[in-house]
Amino acid sequence: MADITSALTASGHKSICVYDAQLRPLGRIESWVSLVWPERYNVYSNVQGAQLELHDTTALQALCRPDRYLWLIGSDRLMRIVSAQKADHKLVISTKDAACILDERISTGTLSSFAVENTLRGLVSGTAWPCLELGDAAGLTDTYTGEVKPGSLLSIAEQVCQELDIGFRVRFDQPQKKLLFELYRPKLDPNARYAPQYGNLTDLTYTESITDYKNICTVVGADGTVTVGATGNTGAARRELLLDASSRKKEEKQSQDDYLASLRALGEQELAKHLRLENFRFTPTGPVTVGKVVAASLPGTDIQAAARITAVTLQSQKGENSVTTEIGTPILRRKNT
């Protein structure tokens, strides 16, 4: 799949086009009181989409109706209007990323040990949502070894992609008037180096914490018990956690080995919630795109970090634009290791 990235920049005049549910153009917005336009890597359900505040007019009220889409020219995302509130001569438009249309389709079966890209694309291909199609496959070979319960396609995609550091999006193909579901995971660009001396990052902080750290999990099921993690650790290095899975019973045709394997998967998932926190935060100031991996060094230490850009947000007010970034949990290493 070609590397297609959003073009959120602070420079240039910004315009928004409005489309109906069939992606037919309805109108254009050239000015506003304020705009916040976020684009994210794999988190959509519990966060806001674009927020647009307009001077209230009858024409804008008629144009900006729920279930219609907003497109910031230059972006590769659409935002679906979920509410329009009129107050104090202002019209406030709230949206969700178009990826949230996946929240309106469900999967009724339990998924376990599956090929991620093929499975998620198969689920989305059966949605029958207007103008939604599959984009090019990314060629990802990841297998999800845990278990995913029935739920919305959005909750399934978020659970799997967040655990495996895979991005997903519903990309707007403006020339073809299509919504394209895609998975993606950019790799580290060795030439994209960030450091204070380069003038392309700010706000460096380093945190190390074992507040909620556990490295061994014993899972007690109705028909068996397993222990996973760093079981060879002893003394102060051993940090145990108990998971009550008494409601998990062996199914009628399930072998004992398969049942214990399902308990081990639960234990691994629980340990993933109790990691040792070693965090390196920084704000890139150079051009960045959602999903890009950036690398930086902490001055005065032997610590280097690589972190993924998990969100890029354009803020526009009174004709002035700015772009901010959010990064995920960095992968740390020391120069001498």
Image: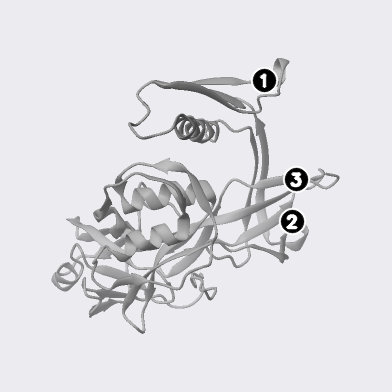
The correct choice, above or below, for 115 with respect to 260 in the image is below
- Between residues 80 and 332, which one lies in front from this camera angle? 332
Secondary structure under tag 2 reads helix
The residue pinned by badge 1 equals: 238
Q: Whole-percent x and y of residue 278?
A: 66, 37
Earlier residue among tags 1 and 2? 2
The correct choice, above or below, for 99 with respect to 43 in the image is below
Is residue 321 visible in the rendered image? The answer is yes
For the point 37% across and 49% down, the residue is 156
Specify the label residue 333 is tagged with: 3
Name the amino acid, label 2.
Pro
Specify the label residue 56 is tagged with: none
Secondary structure under tag 3 reads strand
The residue pinned by badge 2 equals: 196
Q: Whole-percent x and y of residue 185?
A: 55, 61
Earlier residue among tags 2 and 3? 2
- Would you say the residues marked 2 and 3 are in contact, meaning their CB atoms lie under 8 Å apart? no
Q: CA distance from mark 1 to mark 2?
A: 39 Å
Secondary structure under tag 1 reads loop
Q: Whole-percent x and y of residue 93?
A: 26, 60
Name the amino acid, label 3.
Arg
Disc 2 crowd, CA 10 A, few/some/many (<14, 14-19, 20+): some
Name the quadrant containing residue 130.
Answer: bottom left
